[in-house]
Amino acid sequence: MPGPPPPRATTSTGNLVPVEVVDGPEHCTAPAGGSAVTIGAYDGVHLGHRHLLAELRRQAAARHLTSVVVTFDRHPATVVRPQSAPPILTDREQKLELLASAGIDRTLVVPFDEARAKETAEEFVLEVLVGALGARLVVVGEDFHFGHRRAGNVALLAEMGSRHGFDVVGMALEEDGSRQAVSSTRIRELLAACDVAGAAELLGRPHQVRGVVVHGDGRGGSELDFPTANIAVPDGVARPGEGIYACWYERPDGSVHPAAASLGRNPTFHVAAEPVLEVFLLDFSGDLYGEPARVSFVTHLREERHFDSIEALVTQMNADVAATRAALGLTAERSPS
């Protein structure tokens, strides 16, 4: 199915509805009238998250409360179990943008370190929910756990809420068409299997990675006549499995370009130690070096493979460009800008 270009980039301060971002509960002043709060890593801000956020906003509006998301400056697993921490679906910048686009009034970013990991659930409630936010309502998923050794749950929240003046709603998890819960874990599994279209269905948008354009070996332009932007994706960010993809590429000025991307080890010329993201922008000429880039994966076109000659590789790359146009719903004469 053709994928429309993603919306132009926004920031947590650039939306139509201003969003307040506070770093650390010690810098937070409780909203006048109290707050409706949800808590979580919110990695991906996927459709399950958005379902909960919509309910938070609805109940906050009905009670005249400020809607607040409490999230963390890193995925808690990177501190609690660093050897098995999952790659993140969204970095801080993108997560804040997505939370802002959901219409939340305030995001409180809590630093997560060793001391926070050892904090009891009760201490977290008193410091953050009661002290920093003046919570009157807490909305979380029914499987929510928090605090040292994940000892806190919905029942504990409800018990503490009865003593400290806030109600608690434990929501059933959002399910997809196959009646499976929408989760960040499932999305990572789909990405690893190169199923970027399936991941997009759960995210509500194409999965996007961000990085800076760096110099590669220069072979794409000089030998192949397919100049590519090599994107340095930060470590720890979830990327799709190796292969060739149809994508949308966004520049810092907000312009969005159709692109074919190779995420792999360049087996025709050498085998790289780690997968490299190389992106060819269709119908584009210009210098991208040093620019931040946003690449949104729409469709997996094929597996990466070795070619016996440059001619065979170029023939396949031309076919990949044609397949990219088809996947993105473009014609040879028309591309978005």
Image: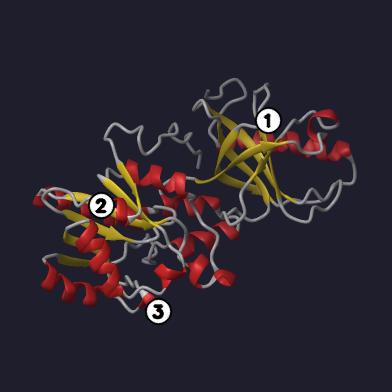
CA distance for labels 2 and 3: 25 Å
Q: Is disc 1 surrounded by few (<14), some (14 to 19) or many (20+) residues within 10 Å?
A: some
Instruction: Where is residue 257? Give x, y as percent.
Output: 57, 29
In this rendering, position of residue 243 left or right of residue 185? right
In this rendering, position of residue 104 left or right of residue 5? left
* Sequence-first tag of 2 and 3: 2
Q: Is residue 329 above or below residue 133?
A: above
* Sequence-first tag of 3 and 1: 3
Give the number of the mark in front: 3 or 1.
Answer: 3
Q: Is residue 336 above or below residue 276?
A: above
Asked if labels 3 and 2 touch by Cβ distance under 8 angstroms, the answer is: no
Secondary structure under the numbered disc 1 in the rendered image? loop
Q: Which residue is mark 2?
A: 68
* Sequence-first tag of 1 and 2: 2
Q: Which residue is mark 3?
A: 149
| Amino acid type, callout 3 | Arg
| Amino acid type, callout 1 | Tyr
User: In the image shown, does 333 or 217 lie closer to the viewer?
Assistant: 217
Instruction: Where is residue 62? Give x, y as percent.
Output: 10, 50
CA distance for labels 3 and 1: 45 Å
Q: Which residue is mark 1?
A: 289
User: In the image shown, does 109 or 274 lie closer to the viewer?
Assistant: 109
Asked if labels 2 and 1 touch by Cβ distance under 8 angstroms, the answer is: no
CA distance for labels 1 and 2: 38 Å
Q: Residue at x 29, y 68 (%)?
A: 124
